[in-house]
Amino acid sequence: MDPFALPPLTALLDAAYGALAGLSTLLEPFAGGAASAAAVILVTLLVRALLIPVGFSQAKAEQTRARLAPRLRELQRRHKKNPERLQRETLELYRSENTSPFAGMLPVLAQAPVVGILYTLFIRPEIAGHPNDLLTHDLFGAPLGTSLVSALFGGTATPATFLVFGVLLVIMLVVAEITRRVFRPAPVEGDSPLNSPTMLRVMSAMHYVTAVFAAFVPLAAALYLTVTVIWTLVQRALLRRRYPLPTTAVAANRTPAPKRVAA
């Protein structure tokens, strides 16, 4: 079943189409053939600007979690044989600090509908019964409605497609590597599965998931993801200065976890 066949979602998609098409028309005198791509960038910047207050909450939550880490480890030590008591005490600790273990996830959740709408706008030949003119737009010759994977397997890839997607993917990979190095999570003390080499590799690889995902979505959505990861990195670096982590957490963040020596 197509969820966008439901009248409320059809109206929402049509409204989003009209807004993006209208913005593209306004930008056409300045951006020319890349007007729709410019409109996607402006929408991304607008969404991220609206989420700035949430970014502050996310930075404060990260600072609070780092400050509470020693107390959480003590709770884990004391109640490791009683999971229910550990869960109850952990939630009570977070409640006493007016925070939550899930604080800071809102930026990702809030952007999911925007990415979903952009994805849908650039894969449907018709929107609310009328032709989707957005599919005729491109960025430097690469169609905004084509994904890198579909172009490769569909035999429609062009040098422009490889060039534009290549630039976006390189940017996302560079941002992911900077994020991985600068915001490396502090190692967990004790004999924790999180300190295992496999888990550390998995956590490190998670930084590159967005770049992999971008290869499967239309170019318009990949452009949104590129702009938002750059924004996230810059915003996080600025907010880290305002909400620095405790000194012990910073030191642990910069010190690699000790290797286990086989007996």
Image (cartoon, rainbow, N blue to C red):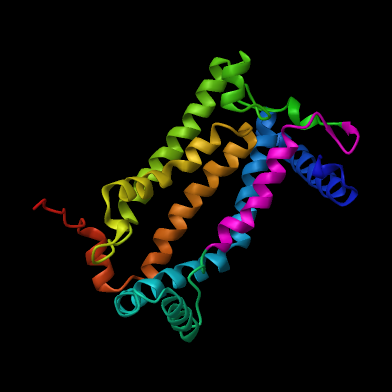
Residue drawn at x 70%, y 35% is: 36
Is residue 145 in the magenta section? no
Question: Where does residue 233 sit, x and y in percent of width and height?
Answer: 44, 53
Magenta span has 113? yes
Q: Observer-nearest residue: 126 or 79?
A: 79
Boundaries of the magenta span: 105-130
Give above or below for 154 relative to 136: above
Q: Residue furthest top?
A: 155
Q: Which residue lies furthest to the bottom in this view?
A: 96
Image-quadrant location for residue 140: top right
Please state if 24 lies on the left or on the right of 234 as rendered: right
Identified at 32% across, 54% down, the residue is: 182
Q: Can residue 243 be seen in this view?
A: no
Q: Position of residue 138 (x, y in %)?
A: 66, 27
In front: 123, or 192? Answer: 192
Q: Position of residue 92 (x, y in %)?
A: 47, 83
Q: Which residue lies furthest to the left in this view?
A: 263
**Left or right of 150 on screen, residue 62:** left
Q: Which residue is drawn at 48% across and 54% down?
A: 232
Is the stretch drawn in magenta largely helix, strand or loop? helix
The answer to whether residue 176 of the structure is visible from this angle is: yes
Q: Is residue 30 above or below residue 92?
A: above
Count of numbered labels shown in the rendering: 0
**Which residue lies at the image location 35% right of the left edge and 78% below the top edge?**
79
Can you say which quadrant of the picture contains the N terminus?
top right
User: Taking 138 as reference, is 168 left or right?
Assistant: left
